[in-house]
Image: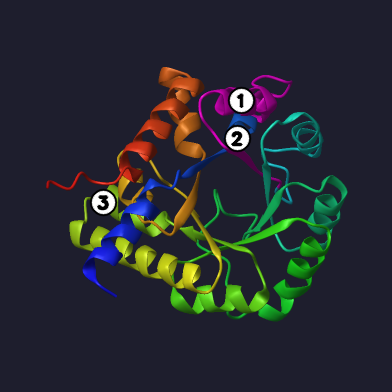
Amino acid sequence: MSNSIVSAASAAAGRTRLRLGVNIDHVATIRNARGGRHPDPLRAAHLAIGAGADGITAHLREDRRHISDADMARLKTELTRPLNLEMAATEEMLAIALRHVPHACCLVPEKREEKTTEGGLDVVRTEGHIRPYVEALKGAGIRVSLFVEPSLPAVEASARLGAQVVELHTGAYCGRALADDAAGLAHELVRIERAAHAAAAAGLEVHAGHGLTFNTVAAVARIPEIVELNIGHFLVGEAIFSGLGPAVARMRTLIDEARRPARVEP
């Protein structure tokens, strides 16, 4: 393939609008700290959509530490954009997903003692356990995503399982950025790039997320195979200072700017 064809293909990929999914879990975390109804995750979802979000993500955990069953029912009934349910591969969560039938379900690892999701789903060692959940969700017309580490074995296992989507865990990349570890940051970015390329080549839609901020999102957004980013905790935190709408709007702008093809001088 000539360099001109490669450049044209890269430019076309760069022009593809990158979707932004906003995770509203931690709006519910703040509400639950005191009880009652405020702040309302559904109101947050509407604000995020109004500011440029293409979809909403909510993680219904086994211990219901943030999003509740009632929240899920309201989100499914009232949202005007796709709802992505993050869930553990358990019979309880499968029953809930099949009852509400969200646009998509992202299977994630879950431990009661963790503060947030730690790492990707071990799809390589747990294929036999995960497969029935993938098949049941797909059978109900729900798009299935697997939240995995940016590694080739994880991507290959996801393809074997028949998932339509992989969401690449960007936590290690963001952790290197926080540690001001330039070499580690570059290494993690290469891992994400290689995994994204392999996933797209295997016919999987590629998403990414976890820990992304205004300062770290651009490099990930430039990866042409990635079509969606899911961001939550950072945006809810920024909302304390600027409001949720402005925080989402700024993230939307940064993503669009990163995705815009570089100008080629004649």
The stretch drawn in magenta includes residue 38: yes
- Left or right position of 62 against 28: right
How dense is the environment of label 3, judged by Cα within 10 Å: few (below 14), some, or many (20 and up)?
Answer: few
Which residue in the protein does label 2 denote?
24
Residue type beneath disc 1: Ala
Residue type beneath disc 3: Ala
As helix, strand or loop, the secondary structure at mark 1 comes to helix
Q: Residue 38: horizontal and vertical position, in percent? A: 67, 19
Magenta stretch?
Answer: 31-60
As helix, strand or loop, the secondary structure at mark 2 comes to loop
Whether residue 235 is situated above or below residue 266 in the rendered picture: above
Query: What distance separates the C-alpha of mark 1 from that of mark 2?
Result: 7 Å
Which residue in the protein does label 1 denote?
44
**Residue 179, which numbered label?**
3
- Residue drawn 33% across the image and 51% down it: 222
From where the camera sits, is residue 117 visible? yes
In contact (CB < 8 Å): disc 1 and disc 2: yes
From where the camera sits, is residue 209 visible? no
